[in-house]
Image (cartoon, helix red, strand yellow):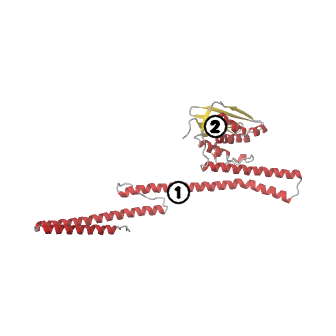
């Protein structure tokens, strides 16, 4: 069974081998010559070699000790999680090379730690957002249910309360579906299937979702899209993104208003403009409206949970596209979706 040699064991082994070799050398020398000058020179030479060997071993041991101490100090700082770990990268010595590798390992560990913290923070924020969004409909459901159980209501009044409860259940259902979509997109469970597809079909699929609501509010919907335009995109998820923009346009456009969809095929990208004649968005809210669960204080009387535009941005960006917003208060808004004409690898 092999045993690992210690540093001291190596030194002792080298010394023993040197003594044995010297003894053999002396035996052969003294056996073959009686010249005192040669014998004396050999003895002096062997003593000098021994002295140099001892000096070399001492220097090597000092270097190894210094290297070991430096390495241990860096590792201890890394294990302790210090933020200001210093590495000696100036010299071209073995210590410098090891410190360079340690620095790379440390940076990887720090990036991993930072990523875990960011993911943890994101999860905490999402849980907080979910609890906040769920709280209102659950509270309303409890209140409506208690009223139905504790009070004698006329059939008409009871039906009214049941309809209110159904609207809150619909809100919870919509919220849960949005959560599932967000979770699947963010965790990479869903892989978008991008392939050359007529954008006309995708726009039509998105418009079918708002047709009834637009009719109820007597909103005119105008579409300008060349059926021959083909763009690499995921038809189902891109339609979902466009529907979210159109759904907001219907919600925030007053009765009798107008929504227009215009598609332009440019050299590098295809632009889809969705314009409405709604209330408009303040310029300082342009970036915030794409945040998860963000809603302006002025629109809390309108149904919604604030995830549509967030989903829209995620879907478009995962296909290599982007979204721009232009708006004027009281004049309406225009959301411009840009999809690249070349498939993103």
Instruction: Name the foreground residue: 326 vs 106.
Output: 106
Q: Marks 2 and 1, how far apart in space?
A: 37 Å
**Of 14 and 108, which appears nearest the observer?**
14
Seen in the picture, residue 122 relative to 214 is either above or below; the reply is: below
User: Residue 70: horizontal and vertical position, in percent?
Assistant: 39, 62
Q: Is mark 1 on a helix, strand or loop?
A: helix
N-terminal of the pair, mark 2 or mark 1, is 1
Q: Where is residue 29 in the image (x, y as percent from the top left)?
A: 15, 67
Quadrant hosting residue 152 = bottom right
Dot 2: what SS?
strand
Decide if residue 274 is in sight here.
no
Question: In the picture provided, is 164 more to the left or to the right than 239?
Answer: right
- Quadrant, the N terminus: bottom left
Q: Can you identify the residue that label 1 sits on?
A: 113
Asked if labels 1 and 2 touch by Cβ distance under 8 angstroms, the answer is no
Q: Which of 95 and 252 is in front in this view?
A: 95
Task: Pinpoint residue 80: horizontal percent, then vertical percent.
Answer: 48, 63
Residue ID at (38%, 63%): 68
Which residue corresponds to the image point at 36% horizontal and 63% vertical from the top-left? 66
In this view, the mark in front (2 or 1) = 1
Dot 2, how many residues are within 10 Å of its Cα: few (below 14), some (14-19), or many (20+)?
many
Q: Which residue is drawn at 50% across and 56% down?
A: 110
- The crowd level at tag 1 (other Cα within 10 Å; few <14, some 14-19, many 20+) is few
Left of 85 or right of it: where is 153? right
Determine which of the numbered discs, if any, sits on residue 336 in the image.
2
* Image location (x, y in percent) of residue 262: 66, 33
């Amino acid at each position: 069974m092999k045993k690992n040699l210690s540093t001291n064991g190596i030194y002792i082994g080298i010394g023993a081998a040197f003594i044995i070799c010297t003894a053999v050398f002396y035996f052969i020398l003294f056996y073959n010559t009686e010249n005192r000058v040669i014998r004396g020179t050999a003895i002096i030479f062997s003593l000098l070699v021994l002295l140099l060997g001892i000096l070399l071993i001492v220097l090597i041991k000092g270097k190894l000790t210094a290297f070991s101490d430096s390495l241990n100090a860096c590792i201890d700082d890394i294990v302790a999680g210090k933020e200001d770990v210093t590495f000696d990268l100036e010299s071209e010595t073995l210590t410098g090379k090891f410190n360079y590798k340690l620095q790379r390992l440390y940076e990887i560990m720090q990036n991993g730690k930072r990523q875990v913290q960011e993911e943890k923070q994101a999860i905490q924020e999402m849980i907080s957002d979910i609890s906040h969004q769920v709280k209102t409909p659950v509270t309303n459901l409890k209140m409506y249910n208690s009223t139905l159980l504790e009070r004698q209501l006329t059939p008409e009044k009871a039906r009214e309360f049941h309809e209110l409860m159904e609207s809150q259940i619909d809100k919870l259902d919509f919220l849960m579906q949005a959560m599932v979509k967000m979770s699947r997109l963010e965790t990479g469970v869903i892989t978008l299937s991008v392939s050359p597809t007529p954008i006309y079909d995708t726009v039509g699929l998105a418009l079918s979702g708002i047709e009834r609501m637009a009719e109820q509010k007597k909103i005119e919907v105008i579409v300008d899209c060349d059926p021959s335009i083909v763009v690499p995109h995921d038809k189902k998820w891109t339609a979902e993104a466009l529907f979210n923009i159109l759904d907001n346009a219907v919600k925030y456009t007053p009765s009798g208003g107008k929504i227009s969809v215009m598609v332009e095929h440019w050299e590098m990208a295809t632009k889809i403009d969705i314009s409405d004649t709604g209330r408009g968005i303040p310029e300082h809210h342009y970036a915030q409206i794409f945040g998860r669960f963000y809603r302006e204080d002025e629109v809390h009387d309108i149904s919604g949970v604030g995830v549509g535009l967030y989903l829209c941005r995620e879907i478009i960006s995962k296909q290599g596209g982007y979204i721009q917003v232009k708006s004027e208060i009281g004049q309406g808004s225009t959301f411009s979706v840009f999809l690249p004409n070349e498939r993103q690898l």
